[in-house]
Image: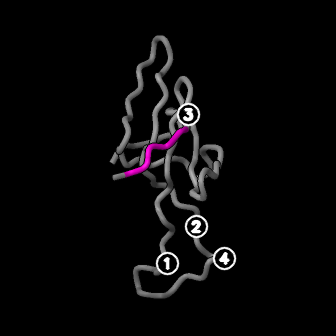
Amino acid sequence: MAKKLNVTPLHDRVLIQPAAAETKSAGGIIIPDTAKEKPQRGTVVAVGAGKKDEPMTVKTGDTVLYGKYAGQELEFEGKQYLIMRESDIVAIL
């Protein structure tokens, strides 16, 4: 059973756990840590209540794509998360 996260985003903000960075290229070449790109995909962990006139579109458990430099990094209980506005999310997969 998954442990409940005690972080609640406010208003139109979303808490995302980024996907792991790729360790091999499509051709099987191992990519060193210094050359890995920041992932642009992740899983929604928590969702705020939304704004008065704008209900939230994403929900907990959705896999989403977001901008390369979107969000604020947050470390909580040894895990990395991003907190960003829903408008920074470009697609739900």
Q: Secondary structure at mark 3?
A: strand
Q: From this view, report whether residue 19 is shown above or below residue 87.
A: below
Q: Amino acid at mark 3?
A: Arg
Labelled pair 2, 4 in contact (Cβ < 8 Å) = no
Q: Secondary structure at mark 4?
A: helix
In this figure, which residue is indicated by the disc labeled 2?
Answer: 37
How far apart, in angstroms, are the residues tagged by discs 3 and 2?
Answer: 22 Å
> In the image, residue 80 lies at what x, y percent?
58, 55
Q: Which residues are magenta?
A: 2-6
> In the image, residue 81 lies at what x, y percent?
56, 50
Labelled pair 1, 2 in contact (Cβ < 8 Å) = no
Q: Amino acid at mark 4?
A: Thr
> In the image, residue 86 lies at what x, y percent?
50, 33
Q: From this view, report whether residue 65 is shown above or below residue 47.
A: below
Q: How is the image coloured?
A: one colour
In this figure, which residue is indicated by the disc labeled 4?
Answer: 34
Name which of mark 1 and mark 2 comes first in the sequence: 1
Name which of mark 3 and mark 4 comes first in the sequence: 4
Q: Residue at x 58, y 47 (%)?
A: 82
How far apart, in angstroms, are the residues tagged by discs 4 and 1?
Answer: 11 Å
Q: Which mark is residue 23?
A: 1
Q: Which mark is residue 85?
A: 3
Give the mark toward the camera: 3 or 2.
3
